[in-house]
């Protein structure tokens, strides 16, 4: 296997990105299997601010989506990361970490205020994410609501994201 490389999503990646999100979350214990629908809806609404793919041997194997979010009183400059997905056969090889690092580099280049997410603190703390007093994502236990300031202000308040994150699972 060649080294993974990270690049921006292109129109020819759309189907692969969808398949990556479906496969990555198929057996995830807390997923509603809507991650692919979230990415599709963000893309359709022009709200997919950053969409990066990890490619190995010219095949997409991972994806990260970043979209604008409001955090408390800060309506501008904040982003939410997610979903982050890697094909099951390519997991545990550092690809997810590469995607997060590349996504944060994009946000720094945009002079973003910061990034928030809902995720595993054991994974995301290595990138500087942490829990913050008063940082809330409705319906999610506080230990899984993480933020990373890229500026002067710590993340504080309720996180508001695009309506795509409320999308319902597809019916069988």
Image (spheres, grey):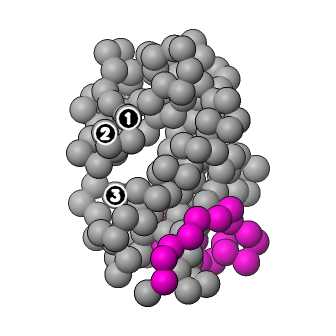
Q: Secondary structure at mark 2?
A: helix
Residue 171 showing in the rendered view: no
Q: Is residue 64 visible?
A: yes
The answer to if 139 sits in the magenta stretch is no
Q: Is residue 122 above or below residue 15?
A: above
The verdict on residue 18 being magenta is yes
Neighbor class of circle 1 (other Cα within 10 Å; few <14, some 14-19, many 20+) is few
Q: Which dot, 1 or 3, sits closer to the camera?
A: 1
Residue named by callout 3: 31
Crowding near the residue tagged with mark 3, few <14, some 14–19, many ≥20 C-alpha atoms within 10 Å: few
Per the model, the C-alpha gap separating discs 2 and 1 is 5 Å
Between disc 2 and disc 3, the foreground one is: 2
Label 2 vs 3, first from the N-terminus: 3
Q: Which residue is mark 1?
A: 128
Q: Quadrant of residue 154?
A: top left
Which span of residues is magenta-colored?
2-22
């Amino acid at each position: 296997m060649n080294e993974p490389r990270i690049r921006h999503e292109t129109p020819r990646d759309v189907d692969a990105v969808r398949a990556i999100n479906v496969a990555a979350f198929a057996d995830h214990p807390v997923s509603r299997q809507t991650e692919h629908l979230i990415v599709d809806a963000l893309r359709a609404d022009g709200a997919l601010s950053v969409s990066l793919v990890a490619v190995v041997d010219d095949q997409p194997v991972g994806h990260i989506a970043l979209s604008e979010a409001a955090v408390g009183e800060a309506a501008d400059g904040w982003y939410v990361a997610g979903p982050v997905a890697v094909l099951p056969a390519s997991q545990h090889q550092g690809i997810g970490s590469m995607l997060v690092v590349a996504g944060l580099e994009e946000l720094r280049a945009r002079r973003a205020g910061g990034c928030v997410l809902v995720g595993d603190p054991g994974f995301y703390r290595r990138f500087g994410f942490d829990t913050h007093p008063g940082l809330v994502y409705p319906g999610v236990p506080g230990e899984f609501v993480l933020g990373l300031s890229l500026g002067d202000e710590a993340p504080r308040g309720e996180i508001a994201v695009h309506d795509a994150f409320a999308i319902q699972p597809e019916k069988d």
